[in-house]
Amino acid sequence: MALLAGATAAAVALARKNKLNRPIAWYLVGIVALDLVRLGVSQLLPTTPPSAPVVGSVLFARHVDVAAYLGQIMLLPAMTMALFLRKRPWIIGVVYLAIAVVLIASYPSIRGNELLEIYTGIELASVVASFGFWIMWLCSPRLTEDRAVSVHITSGVVLTSTNMATVVLPPLTGPGILAKWPIFVALHASSFAFVLVFQLRYLLMKTGKGKL
């Protein structure tokens, strides 16, 4: 969490000097905010999957957690669309709202392992879309131009690659979400550490030297 907070602070500071870094900043701010939301509602959620549908405040917390986790997944294609295509990711927001409504309204028909399988499918679609935006950028005439101010592009590629790896690599460790957890932690910690050092170094080098 400390690495994420540091990377977020560096990205926000750099975004104030370079607007092209704003997608990175908004992505990290969103991840932090939704992590805090999930941490808050986790106090109301049972530690083990309940055998019967939940009700009341626990049901509300469950719905908030679903919406927050789904939001974290959808932040990736939103960031890559804004970063690589330089387009406002309204369509990603519409897709997010539609999926969130369906998942919340489908409870208790969809829960437990079925919900985890849906999450996995959405994560896969998210990284595929993000990879597609990346490829579109590689094929665009802006490729040479963006390389001249590549701090935001490099950070975006690292974050995108990390999310792709967390979807592609974990099945090799065995079934279940618990098998994925160590890989999630290691990969994301490494990417946040890179973004923190890379953006902070760039920010310190360029502070007071004019427009980036």
Image (spheres, helix red, strand yellow):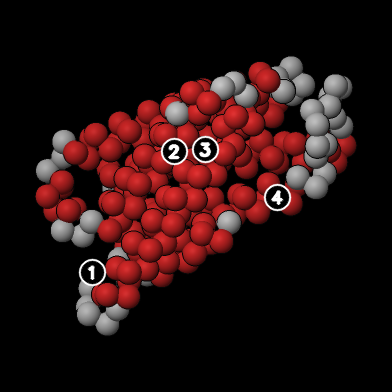
Secondary structure beneath disc 2? helix
**In this figure, which residue is indicated by the disc labeled 2?**
163
Cα gap from disc 4 to disc 3, whole angstroms: 20 Å
**In this figure, which residue is indicated by the disc labeled 1?**
212
Quadrant in which the C terminus is drawn? bottom left
Would you say the residues marked 2 and 4 are in contact, meaning their CB atoms lie under 8 Å apart? no
Cα gap from disc 2 to disc 4, whole angstroms: 21 Å
Cα gap from disc 1 to disc 3, whole angstroms: 35 Å
Judge left or right: residue 126 versus residue 63: left
The residue that appears at 41% across and 62% down in the rendered structure is 196
Which amino acid does the dot numbered 3 rest on?
A: Ile
Cα gap from disc 2 to disc 3, whole angstroms: 11 Å
Residue 208 screen position, x and y as percent = 27, 82
Residue 18 in the image: above or below residue 99: below
Which one is closest to the eye, mark 1 or mark 3? 3
Q: In this orientation, which residue lies closer to the viewer: 175 or 60?
A: 175
Would you say the residues marked 1 and 3 are in contact, meaning their CB atoms lie under 8 Å apart? no
**In this figure, which residue is indicated by the disc labeled 3?**
183
Marked residue nearer the N-terminal end (1 or 3): 3
Which one is closest to the eye, mark 2 or mark 3? 3
Q: Which mark is residue 98?
A: none
Residue 93 visible here = no
Cα gap from disc 2 to disc 1, whole angstroms: 28 Å
Marked residue nearer the N-terminal end (2 or 4): 4
Marked residue nearer the N-terminal end (2 or 3): 2
The residue that appears at 39% across and 46% down in the rendered structure is 159
**In this figure, which residue is indicated by the disc labeled 4?**
39
User: Which quarter of the figure has residue 200?
Assistant: bottom left
The residue that appears at 80% across and 47% down in the rendered structure is 43
Which one is closest to the eye, mark 4 or mark 1? 4
Secondary structure beneath disc 3? helix
